[in-house]
Image: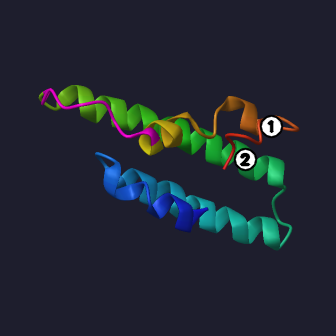
Amino acid sequence: MIKATDLVRPLLPFPELLDRENALRKALAEQVQTRTMSLLERNIQIQKLHSQLLEEERSRLSAAPADGSKPPPLAVTQWRQSNGESCGRLGGDSGTCY
């Protein structure tokens, strides 16, 4: 997943937010692999951080002057829509949970 999101990184207005998400993703993967955390718990943690990062991005974008640029690329929109609240539920929404 981290390699896949590397493609989106240069398109994001604040790529360090994705870096934070990927750092957590890596740490949680190790915990799941050592069985100190369940996959469901991992999904909940990713979802929470993802929501926080999107809120931080919104806050930064609203504070920045509007540049009148075109809409974000599809990959950016898809990243923003990934890891919704349903990812933290049993079964999740595997189509958008990363």
User: Where does label 2 land, which residue?
Assistant: 43
User: Where does label 1 land, which residue?
Assistant: 92
Crowd around label 1: few <14 · some 14–19 · many ≥20 (10 Å): some
**Who's the residue at 50% across and 58% down the image?**
5
Q: Quadrant of residue 47?
A: top right
Residue segment shown in magenta: 66-74
Amino acid beneath label 2: Asn
Determine whether the residue tagged by mark 1 lies in a helix, strand or loop: loop
Report if residue 71 lies within the magenta region: yes
**Who's the residue at 34% across and 48% down the image?**
12
Q: Are marks 2 and 1 in contact (CB under 8 Å)?
A: yes
Camera-near label (2 vs 1) is 1
63 left or right, relative to 23: left
The x, y position of residue 98, in whole percent, is 66, 50
Determine whether the residue tagged by mark 2 lies in a helix, strand or loop: helix
**Who's the residue at 74% across and 31% down the image?**
86
Instruction: State the separation of the CA atoms marked 2 and 1.
Output: 9 Å
The x, y position of residue 16, in whole percent, is 35, 56
The x, y position of residue 94, in whole percent, is 77, 42
**Who's the residue at 61% across and 67% down the image?**
26
